[in-house]
Amino acid sequence: MNVLGIDIGGSGIKGAPVDTKAGELVEDRLRIPTPEPSSPPAVAKVVKSIRAHFGWTGPVGVTFPGVVVDGVVRTAANVDPSWVGVDAARLFGEATVLNDADAAGLAEMSFGCGRGHEGTVLVLTFGTGIGSALFIDGVLVPNTELGHLELHGKDAEHRASSRVREDHEMSWDKWGERVEEYLKHVEMLFSPALIVIGGGVSKKADKFLPHVHIDTPVVPAALLNQAGIIGAAQAAAGLARRAH
């Protein structure tokens, strides 16, 4: 089943049709900068234009950078605060809407580095913030938001996100130390069998992962920055199948 996947990020909104059996994009993705301010009407307009670009009439899956329960947004850390309480599923034309890191995790567990892994697996996305997806024997525990764990009296994502590295012009090894500190905290809490690092920074894993030393195996995401699009489509395909 081909499904349109759309990934809403703090800096860009990306979309493409996905072959949900193979976990692959079937057309080149379209990326549009996230509008400023990232209000619900402004973001909905971009989502609509992505649908129009692909001439899409079938199922659509959309990721959102915050807690999403039954299609309704509960938190909005890195987008406009007016999102809280919005029925995003309805706003996006009855799309399937889920947390962005959860979507990336679903894709990575089905088609990437998490495939076939039992036990506790953590997929962490480093970008504007830090997203998290927690899996127990392949089953997602949704909306974990582990980027908001406290480190040194502040949200972990305010110390170790990819944006923090860029804003403070940190070297890769210096930032790697902060990532290690965060991962040690997460490791202590969850004792995972595997940690997968996703988000845009995953394609630069060779620059910082050599500076990260923890007991848990840590690997870069196989699907790199396409994971959100693929996972969003996958979630929508699953709902469509259950509906029939």
Image: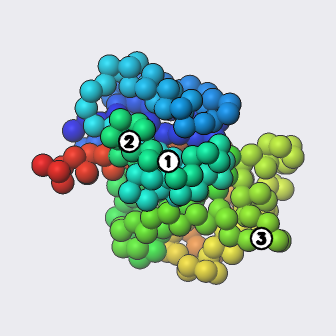
Query: Type of residue at label 2?
Result: Arg
Question: Rounded to the nearest whole Å, what is the CA distance between mark 1 and mark 3?
Answer: 30 Å
Asked if disc 2 and disc 1 are in contact, CB closer than 8 Å, the reply is no
Which residue is at 35% across, 35% downward? 93
Which residue is at 40% across, 66% downward? 140
Is disc 3 placed on a helix, strand or loop?
Answer: strand
Q: Which residue was labeled with disc 2?
A: 90
Question: Rounded to the nearest whole Å, what is the CA distance between mark 2 and mark 3?
Answer: 36 Å
Mark 3 neighbour density, 10 Å: few (under 14) some (14–19) many (20 or more)? some
Question: Rounded to the nearest whole Å, what is the CA distance between mark 2 and mark 1?
Answer: 9 Å
Is disc 1 placed on a helix, strand or loop?
Answer: loop
Query: Type of residue at label 3?
Result: Leu
Q: Earlier in the sequence, mark 1 or mark 3?
A: 1
Q: Which residue was labeled with disc 1?
A: 86
Query: In this view of the protein, which residue sits in the foreground, 96 or 188?
Result: 96
Q: Which residue was labeled with disc 3?
A: 151
Which residue is at 31% across, 46% downward? 236
Mark 2 neighbour density, 10 Å: few (under 14) some (14–19) many (20 or more)? few
Which residue is at 38% across, 57% downward? 70
Q: Nearer the viewer, mark 1 or mark 3?
A: 1
In the drawing, what numbered circle is on residue 158?
none
Query: In this view of the protein, which residue sits in the foreground, 94 or 184?
Result: 94
Colour pattern of the rendering: rainbow
Mark 1 neighbour density, 10 Å: few (under 14) some (14–19) many (20 or more)? some
Query: Type of residue at label 1?
Result: Val
